[in-house]
Image (tube, rainbow, N blue to C red):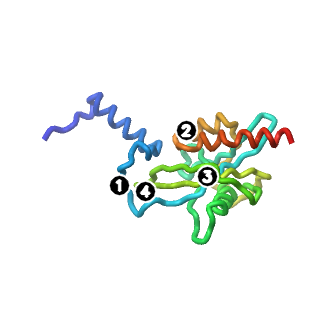
Amino acid sequence: MVRANPTDPIFLSWRSIMFHIESCHCSALLPDVPVGKGPRNQAGAIVWQASPMGLQILLVERSSGKGWGIPKGGIERGESSQDAALREAWEEAGVEAKSRIQEVGQMRYVKRNRHQVVQLHAVEALGLVNEWPEALWRRRAWFSLEDAIREVDRFSGLEKAFRALQPAAKIKLVA
């Protein structure tokens, strides 16, 4: 049996490509990934505010502590996707928000060998509290639109959803 040489440039390139695909959760590139149990439905909150500097998006530190993302999580039994997005924004970032929010897209990725389908919701922040359920282990920060896109670039679907909020922020500043 012929074994791959781990120092061979072709072998190294293949390993780096697979690492990139796995780390960026590029499920569109891996449609035949064997997954268990079927997709997990989640809700995500794209928390935003208008400021004189333009649209700002609130990101939270990922639970792994590696990088930033949006507040998101599973939808509980009997809960709507909108209610789950508001709950996640509160639990993960201490967001006080309008109760009426808008769905702005969908994001798909693979995590722990299971497809994740996230309904994305635009959540306008009315304020942030100093103490919230996950405050002890999760940081939050406001980012400009372009900085937020750079921080979450590996999640397909977020850039488009982030950019869709620009007109709302401009209207808010004029009003």
In this figure, which residue is indicated by the disc labeled 4?
114
Task: Answer whether labels 1 and 4 touch (C-beta < 8 Å).
Answer: no
In this figure, which residue is indicated by the disc labeled 2?
153
Placement of the N terminus among the 4 image quadrants: top left
The single residue placed furthest to the bottom in the displayed view is 78
| Relative image position of residue 49 (x, y in whole percent) | 76, 45
In this figure, which residue is indicated by the disc labeled 3?
120
Inspect the image, locate mark 1, and give the three-letter code of the amino acid beneath it. Pro
In this figure, which residue is indicated by the disc labeled 1?
34
Mark 4 or 3, closer to the camera: 3
Q: Which mark is residue 170?
A: none
- Rounded to the nearest whole Å, what is the CA distance between mark 1 and mark 2? 24 Å
Mark 3 or 2, closer to the camera: 3
- Rounded to the nearest whole Å, what is the CA distance between mark 1 and mark 4? 8 Å
Residue at x-position 15% and y-position 38%: 2
| Relative image position of residue 5 (x, y in whole percent) | 23, 33
Q: Mark 2: few, some, or many residues within 10 Å (few <14, many ≥20)?
A: some
- Rounded to the nearest whole Å, what is the CA distance between mark 1 and mark 3? 25 Å
Question: Quadrant location of residue 112?
Answer: bottom left
Inspect the image, locate mark 4, and give the three-letter code of the amino acid beneath it. Arg
Task: Answer whether labels 1 and 3 touch (C-beta < 8 Å).
Answer: no
Which comes before the other along the chain, label 4 or label 3?
4
12, above or below 165, in the image: above
Query: In the depicted view, which residue is nearer to us: 117 or 16?
Result: 117
Left or right relative to 163: residue 118: left
10, above or below 26, in the image: above
